[in-house]
Image: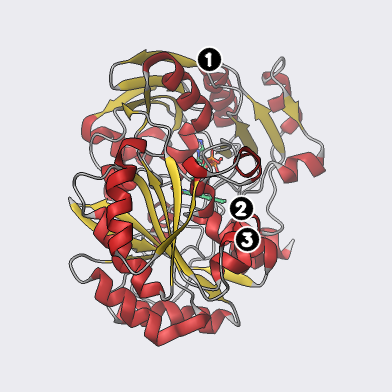
Amino acid sequence: MTDYAALKADLEGLPIEDNPAIVKQKSRDFFWYSPVLKRQLDEVTADLVVTVRTEADVIRVLKACYAHDVPVTTRGAGTGNYGQAMPLSGGVVLNLAEMRKIKRIASGSIVAEAGAIIADIDTVTRQQTGQELRMHPSTYRTATIGGFIAGGSGGVGSINWGGLRDLGNVIRARVVTMEAEPRILDLSGDDVHKVIHAYGTNGIITEVEMPLAASYDWVDVIVGFDSFMDAVHFGNEIGNQDGILTKEIAPIAAPVPHDYFLRHKKYLRKDQSVCVFMVAPFAMSAFEVLAGRSVGDIVYRSDKATEEDLKSLPPAYELAWNHTTLRGLRVDPTITYLQVLYPYPDHIERVGKMESLFGDEVPGHLEFVRFDGNITCFGLPIVRFSTEDRLEEIMRLHEEHGCPIFNPHRYTLEEGGMKQTDQVQLDFKRDADPKGLLNPGKMIGWEDPNFDFQSPAIYLFPGLQEQNQG
Ligand SMILES: Cc1cc2nc3c(=O)[nH]c(=O)nc-3n(C[C@H](O)[C@H](O)[C@H](O)COP(=O)(O)OP(=O)(O)OC[C@H]3O[C@@H](n4cnc5c(N)ncnc54)[C@H](O)[C@@H]3O)c2cc1C
């Protein structure tokens, strides 16, 4: 039985929230994107939320929680969409949202505290040095930089720079361990992989050093097409133009843009597929040449929009990545989505195959990215959800056709990713979190070393079973 009164006494002076309604709210993320996770995780809640403002506060909380055997789940802004930030064993939610100082800006890099909001970082680097982060999630305006590194994978800008896991895209992460005497480790080079996309299961990131690129007043452009595959071919063509600088290329199949992009509706026909772009202003004249040669029409461009439109329309990146799904869910809460890789060099052919196999049951949504040096595409297609069995079948059919699924309907690192434990992250957890108190239930390799990833069984964390029953 955990002695929360004693823990609170140890943490005296730090902001502690124990109102059950607020604690539950701070124990949730965007897990409800998935009907499967919604069913499994709806009751999950922590016991306390502790807010920290300095690294010394983090050390204090970890030390006390270690002494009382209390699990700790870190929270940035809680925009993860696989239940990453949800405390499956209860305990403490460690709120980092107030650790948001920007500490140093240099030519090509920035050092910031982990709770800094990504857009806030860009605002400062743009104003002071004409630079911006290489990539950001579409939750740019709300997500923290630490949460992006620990829970995200890439996004707007990945067309040029690949993903967070690509060496060089995270320069350094400063991490506090979960031990009797927490250590502070500065991880750089290959060592950053110990904590990138590890869901905070093996250390708390307090500070990061990130690379910067030149900043631009990106022009949002939407090109309309009569067919999805025309939009896909055009996106691929632009992605492969070495002279045209873009930051975002997302083909999206009809009727999704018309039906779900409510504020852009006036520019779109119901049967129109689109490709959404962010283009550097100096590249617009070249872009126009290629758009003119294509079978599509530019239906919207922000550099020619009225002031009124600019005020009322969301930026292009909030039509893309997981925002496409979010806009869909607001109109039709019964839909869900997948995460798919269409491997180079057959990516276009595979996209076409999936389109013909599923039609409007799985309307296409692609994100062009640079992957191992080649331009290829990820997919976040919408799924018109019927049953969990059919969802599984749709995923199986993708895999059978050579399109690997990164399952967004699982809360564990392994099942949502490569279906095997990341040995580097597991080894680091053994060292940095010997009691297994950090974000329990998310790394199967730690919880159940004998779990068979080839079996069709879904891992269900025992703590979660208890919560679901209790
Ligand atoms: C509409 C929508 C669009 C999205 N678009 C994208 C996208 O384009 N690309 C993308 O990669 N993701 C995307 N996501 C997922 C998510 O928004 C991002 O990954 C985001 O960067 C997470 O940041 P956060 O601050 O909200 O992290 P949280 O959700 O709070 O945390 C994410 C994970 O990291 C852990 N964590 C948080 N901070 C730390 C820390 N300092 N140290 C250790 N662990 C920590 C948490 O415990 C959790 O496991 C999207 C989600 C939504 C809902």
Q: Label 1 CB, ligand 1: below 8 Å?
A: no
Q: In screen coordinates, is 405 left or right of 55?
A: left
- Which amino acid does the dot numbered 1 rest on? Ala
- Which amino acid does the dot numbered 3 rest on? Lys
- Which amino acid does the dot numbered 2 rest on? Phe
Tag 3 residue = 266
Q: Label 2 CB, ligand 1: below 8 Å?
A: yes
Q: In screen coordinates, is 50 left or right of 188?
A: right
Q: Is residue 112 above or below residue 138?
A: above
- Percent of width and height locating residue 256: 55, 69
Check residue 56 in the rendering and tell me which mark sits there, or answer none: 1
Residue name at image x 29 percent, y 80 percent: 401
Q: Of residues 54 and 405, which is closer to you in this image?
A: 405
Nearer to us: label 2 or label 3 = 3
As measured in the structure, the alpha-carbon distance from the residue carrying label 2 to the one carrying label 1 is 30 Å
As measured in the structure, the alpha-carbon distance from the residue carrying label 3 to the one carrying label 1 is 52 Å
Quarter where residue 335 is shown: bottom right
Task: Say if residue 393 shows up in the picture.
Answer: no
Q: Residues within 10 Å of mark 3 (few under 14, many from 20)?
A: few
* Mark 2 residue element: loop
Tag 2 residue = 30
Residue name at image x 20 percent, y 65 percent: 344
First in residue order: circle 2 vs circle 1: 2
Residue name at image x 72 percent, y 33 percent: 3
First in residue order: circle 3 vs circle 1: 1
Q: Residues within 10 Å of mark 2 (few under 14, many from 20)?
A: some
First in residue order: circle 2 vs circle 3: 2
Nearer to us: label 2 or label 1 = 2
Disc 3 and disc 1 in contact, CB within 8 angstroms: no
